[in-house]
Image (cartoon, rainbow, N blue to C red):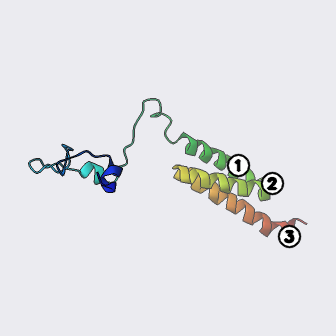
C-alpha cells in the first residue's frame, strides 16, 4: 500500500479498489438530499399550540398598561419602560399593543420635558 491509500484505510486488491459502493457504473444514485440546504421544518406540538404568541401578547398588555399609567404619573420613568416593553412585544408578534405602548411611552416622556417648565 502506498501512503495515500493507507490513510483512507481502503483495501487494494490487484490495483483495484475493493469498495463495492465506490463508482457504480450501472447504478445511478441521487445525492440531492445531501447537497440541498436544510429546510425550515416546524414541528407543531400539541402542548405548544395554545401558547403561541403569549409572551408577546402579555408584554403588549403590560406595556400598554404602563404606557397609560405613564401619562398620569412618573412620566420620565414609566414612559421609557413602556416604550421598551412595547418594542419587545412588537418584536414578539403583538404588533398593535406593542405599537400603542411605544407611542404612549414616547408621548409621555416628551410631554414631561415639554410641560415641566410650566409646572414650576
Residue 74 is situated, as x and y percent measured from the top left of the image, at 80, 54
Measure how far apart labels 2 and 3 are at the Cα level: 16 Å
**In this rendering, would 120 be left or right of 23?**
right
Does label 2 or label 1 sit earlier along the sequence? 1
Which residue is the extreme one toward the top?
A: 47
Does label 2 or label 3 sit earlier along the sequence? 2
Which residue is label 1 attached to? 66
Which residue is label 3 attached to? 117
Measure how far apart labels 3 and 1 are at the Cα level: 24 Å
Measure how far apart labels 2 and 1 are at the Cα level: 10 Å
Residue located at (39% from left, 38% from top): 43
- Number of residues whose C-alpha sits closer than 10 Å to that of mark 1, classed few (under 14), some (14–19) or many (20 or more): many
2 or 3: mark nearer the eye: 2
Label 2, secondary structure: give it. loop
**In this rendering, would 31 be left or right of 103?**
left
Count of numbered circles on the image? 3
Which residue is label 2 attached to? 74
Q: The C terminus is located in which quarter? A: bottom right
Q: Are marks 2 and 1 in contact (CB under 8 Å)?
A: no
Residue 71 is situated, as x and y percent measured from the top left of the image, at 74, 55
- Number of residues whose C-alpha sits closer than 10 Å to that of mark 2, classed few (under 14), some (14–19) or many (20 or more): few
Label 1, secondary structure: give it. helix
Is residue 78 visible to the viewer in this orientation of the structure? yes
Label 3, secondary structure: give it. helix
Foreground of the two, 51 or 8: 8
Residue located at (67% from left, 46% from top): 65
3 or 1: mark nearer the eye: 1
**In this rendering, would 34 be left or right of 90?**
left
Residue located at (25% from left, 44% from top): 11
Which residue is the extreme one toward the left?
A: 26
Amino acid at each position: 500500500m502506498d501512503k495515500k491509500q493507507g490513510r483512507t484505510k481502503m483495501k487494494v486488491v490487484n490495483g483495484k479498489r475493493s469498495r463495492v459502493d465506490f463508482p457504480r457504473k450501472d447504478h445511478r444514485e441521487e445525492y440531492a438530499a445531501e447537497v440541498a440546504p436544510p429546510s425550515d421544518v416546524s414541528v407543531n406540538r400539541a402542548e405548544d399550540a395554545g401558547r403561541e404568541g403569549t409572551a408577546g401578547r402579555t408584554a403588549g398588555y403590560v406595556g400598554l398598561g404602563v404606557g397609560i399609567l405613564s401619562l398620569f404619573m412618573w412620566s420620565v420613568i414609566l414612559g421609557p419602560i413602556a416604550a421598551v416593553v412595547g418594542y419587545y412585544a412588537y418584536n414578539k408578534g403583538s404588533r398593535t399593543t406593542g405599537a400603542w405602548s411605544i407611542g404612549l411611552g414616547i408621548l409621555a416622556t416628551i410631554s414631561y420635558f415639554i410641560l415641566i417648565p410650566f409646572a414650576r
